[in-house]
């Protein structure tokens, strides 16, 4: 049975039946987005058999704030984080900072269990959801730093966990990618496919980097690589980083350049906690249909954004959908990138249920393997503690791709049970609270 590499959108779960891909969006109800404004990668394919994702609870403010599209919240069993989405008309742009501060204060006051609220402010006319045109402003506001953020939103002082767009409302030029997504998918001539099959077999037998590709590591090693695609995602990133930190585990995050640009503080958190940051293109588009120059630019732009944030060169690349050609492989090599695939894909974005997810992972986990997960899959968050325990029971050290191939970039290990500056302080909160809540703000 062919294993599929599944993507599924989480920010617009009421539209789950629209079959979205991870980190992307469909057109939100009541919002018209002209075709010329569609962001490359905004509409993503979905693998057959994908089920509806677990419902993410919403926090409904009373009285309502007209600019607030929604506030969702989620916990990982230790901390709880909310994601607030706001939209503004162009004439209201000057209010963005003050409104972001007001919303952050209202949300944190409305639900005492929250440790952090992540705010994203968009241009209303072009709003296409997560994966559409970039926000105007984003901010990550831990509860203990709310006063600092309020000072910044009032025009006083600075705040390091905020991003402001330099081109609000700018629309991209290319249409979205609509190619159906499968597992590793090499595209080329018969001769190219024959050569790739030989390289693939060699890589499986020998392990390590073969011809610019990495399918698996050394099977005799106690290491396996833990990787997450499509990061960073607001609300989910602090929950995932918190779980990894508590278990002292490093991973490689293959980030989408546009996501990293809009949420740079989460990429900084990854690097600060010893994780490795890889390239997943700038727009999360399939490369084979594109001209080589455009495909190369997708990799270049993503690496530029990532290195600009972390200060470290980008070494590893994962093509969206696992799709590649001799030309894209050569282009990646020319940029100093090793193209990385996987051996263990439990299909967390197929939403199969945590028991199925754990069973798939347990069946295919191996020494020298590469685990593929996604940063904003709610079932992944539920299952991750058990996934880490399975690896520990088998004496498999889950680590970065760099460690797997003997080229470590990160130093040390994240301290367990400790908060990191800018991150929420651990609290006792339930995981995946299943009920929608209507609340009134504190006096």
Image (tube, grey):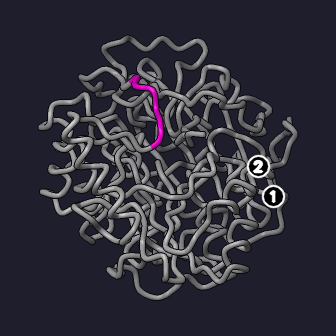
Is 58 situated left or right of 364 in this image?
right
Give the main secondary structure, helix, strand or loop, of the magenta stretch: loop
Is 278 situated left or right of 188 in this image?
right
Q: Residue furthest bottom?
A: 412
Instruction: Give the magenta part as a residue range.
Output: 178-183
| Above or below, comparing residue 262 to residue 35 in the picture | below
Is 127 situated left or right of 441 in this image?
left
Q: Is residue 153 visible?
A: no
> The N terminus lies in which quarter of the figure?
top right
Residue at (81, 52) in percent of width and height? 355
Q: Which disc is residue 113 wearing? A: 1
Could you tell me residue 170's position as x and y percent?
29, 28
Residue at (75, 56) in percent of width and height? 359
| Above or below, comparing residue 4 to residue 178 in the picture | below
Q: Which residue does the numbered mark 2 point to in the structure image?
A: 356
Q: Indicate yes or no whether the magenta region holds residue 399.
A: no
| Label 2, residues with CA under 10 Å away: few <14, some 14-19, many ≥20 | some
Q: Is residue 246 visible?
A: yes
Secondary structure at numbered mark 2:
helix
Could you tell me residue 188's position as x and y percent?
23, 35
Real-space Cα distance between discs 2 and 1? Answer: 30 Å
Residue 173 sits in quarter: top left
């Amino acid at each position: 049975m062919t294993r599929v590499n599944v993507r599924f959108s989480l920010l617009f779960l009421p539209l789950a039946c629209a079959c979205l891909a991870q980190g992307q969006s469909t057109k939100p109800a009541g919002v018209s987005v002209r075709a010329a404004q569609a962001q490359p990668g905004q509409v993503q394919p979905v693998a057959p058999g994908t089920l509806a994702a677990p419902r993410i609870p919403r926090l409904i403010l009373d009285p309502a704030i007209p600019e607030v599209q929604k506030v969702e919240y989620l916990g990982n069993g230790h901390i709880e984080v909310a994601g607030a989405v706001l939209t503004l008309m162009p004439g209201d742009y000057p209010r963005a900072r003050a409104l972001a501060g007001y919303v952050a204060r209202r949300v944190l006051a409305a639900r005492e269990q929250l440790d952090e609220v992540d705010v994203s402010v968009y241009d209303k006319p072009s709003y296409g959801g997560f994966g559409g045109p970039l926000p105007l402003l984003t901010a990550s506001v831990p509860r203990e730093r709310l006063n600092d953020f309020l000072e910044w939103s009032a025009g006083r002082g600075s705040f390091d966990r905020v991003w402001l767009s330099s081109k609000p409302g700018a629309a991209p030029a290319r249409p979205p990618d609509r190619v159906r997504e499968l597992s590793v998918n090499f595209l080329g001539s018969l001769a190219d496919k024959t050569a790739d099959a030989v390289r693939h077999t060699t890589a499986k037998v020998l392990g390590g980097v073969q011809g610019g590709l990495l399918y698996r590591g050394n099977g005799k090693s106690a290491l396996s690589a833990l990787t997450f695609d499509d990061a960073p995602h607001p609300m989910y990133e602090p929950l995932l980083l918190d779980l990894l930190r508590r278990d002292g585990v490093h991973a490689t995050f293959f980030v989408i350049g546009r996501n990293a640009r809009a949420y740079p503080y989460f990429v900084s958190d990854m690097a600060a906690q010893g994780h490795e940051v890889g390239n997943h293109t700038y727009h999360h588009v399939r490369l084979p249909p594109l001209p080589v120059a455009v495909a190369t630019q997708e990799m270049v732009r993503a690496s530029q954004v990532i290195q600009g944030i972390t200060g470290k060169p980008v070494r590893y690349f994962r093509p969206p959908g696992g799709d590649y050609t001799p030309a894209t492989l050569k282009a990646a090599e020319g940029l100093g990138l090793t193209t990385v695939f996987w051996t263990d894909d439990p299909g967390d974005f197929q939403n199969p249920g945590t028991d199925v997810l754990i069973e798939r992972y347990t069946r295919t986990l191996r020494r020298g393997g590469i685990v593929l997960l996604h940063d904003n899959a709610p079932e992944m968050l539920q299952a991750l503690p058990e996934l880490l325990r399975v690896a520990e029971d088998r004496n498999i050290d889950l680590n970065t791709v760099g460690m797997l191939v003997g080229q470590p970039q990160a130093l040390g290990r994240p301290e367990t049970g400790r908060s990191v500056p800018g991150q929420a302080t651990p609290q006792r909160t339930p995981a995946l609270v299943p009920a929608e809540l209507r609340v009134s703000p504190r006096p």
